[in-house]
Image (cartoon, grey):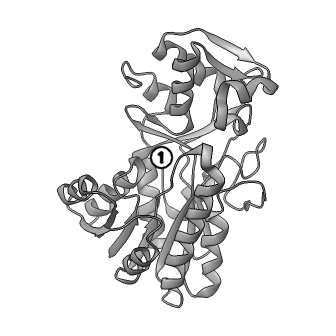
Amino acid sequence: MRVFVTGATGFIGSAVVDELLGAGHQVLGLARSDTGAAALTAAGANVHRGDLQDLDSLKDGARETDGTIHCAFIHDFAKFAENGQIDKRAIEAMGDALEGTNKPFIVTSGTGLVAPGTVVTEDMRSTNPHVPRVSEQVGLAYASRGVRAMAIRLPQVHGKKGKAGLISYLVEAARKKGVAAYAGDGSERWAAAHVLDVARVYKLALEKGMADGVYHAVGEEGVPMSQTTEIIAHAVGVPVVSIKKEEAGEYFGPLAMFAGLDMPASSALTQQRLGWTPKEIGLIADIGQPGYFTG
């Protein structure tokens, strides 16, 4: 299968590209720069120039291939609402191009804000009107328009030095503030997964996922923030402190919306439906390795 991948040079997207190529698929990767294009070529993929705001380029990439995987997102939480709308328009452009083709179209969303405080499952749908990222709702709407539309929800993804989802931003906050903080008692849990396990979910969903299907690329249901914060403190060389939830805005900045949230998630249905089993190293063991967070 020839697959169009957005975000193909990013942390997760590049792992997806490698997984697809290793399984015998061909990849057409979106690249917005010469550096990105060179990286894709070196990986063995073909290059499609453009970016998330070049809607004609996105439509062409989707039309020219047998399936589309949308991994790209602008991760600037200070502009979360604006970037959510850019993502929405990009998904609509690709979805419109795919209408009536029954081609696979995978969009990316997250497990965290579906239903905080509950172990989120694949059968629970995201309905929170206050979450700026609406990729799941917009993408899955194309399942009723002749597209094999699916969504993959991601937890905190680790597996490459310096990369660990929102945890990477917490490391930077610890460096700036001189303390590693968690809100409340630190018992809230964040689901996690290794990037190589995540990449396999994308491949399996592409090959045999069902229209309107939601899949969880979750390796660990929930890792307590107290444990994660201890790792951050050790890596940065600062003490651990507990702060009140009302103080989260000052410490965490744009990430305050996630502070103190219990965000566990299950992948039991994904494992059953796709025949997937997570097998890579866990979050604490991985990010606790010397030098994982450097610089």
Residue 219 in picture, x, y percent from top left: 53, 43
Residue 144 in picture, x, y percent from top left: 65, 84
Residue 27 in picture, x, y percent from top left: 29, 68
User: Vertically, is 287 above or below 160?
Assistant: above
Numbered label tally: 1
Pick the quarter of the image with the C terminus: top left
Which of the 4 image quarters holds residue 151? Answer: bottom right
Pick the quarter of the image with the N terminus: bottom left
Label 1: state its secondary structure: loop
Left or right: where does residue 93 sit relative to residue 213? left
Which residue shows up at 34% across the image and 54% down it?
9
Left or right: where does residue 202 sit relative to residue 31? right
| Mark 1 burial class by Cα count in 10 Å: few <14, some 14-19, many 20+ | some
Task: Give the residue type that dot 1 points to.
Answer: Pro
For the residue pair 115 and 137, the one nearer the viewer reads as: 137
User: Vertically, is 151 above or below 169?
Assistant: below
Residue that extends furthest to the bottom in the rendered view of this protein: 100
Which residue shows up at 18% across the image and 55% down it?
42
Left or right: where does residue 6 sit relative to residue 133? left
Which residue shows up at 78% across the image and 59% down it?
129
Residue 37 in picture, x, y percent from top left: 25, 59
Residue at the spot of label 1: 278
Which residue shows up at 61% across the image and 58% down it?
84
Which of the 4 image quarters holds residue 286? Answer: top left
For the residue pair 14 and 30, the one nearer the viewer reads as: 30
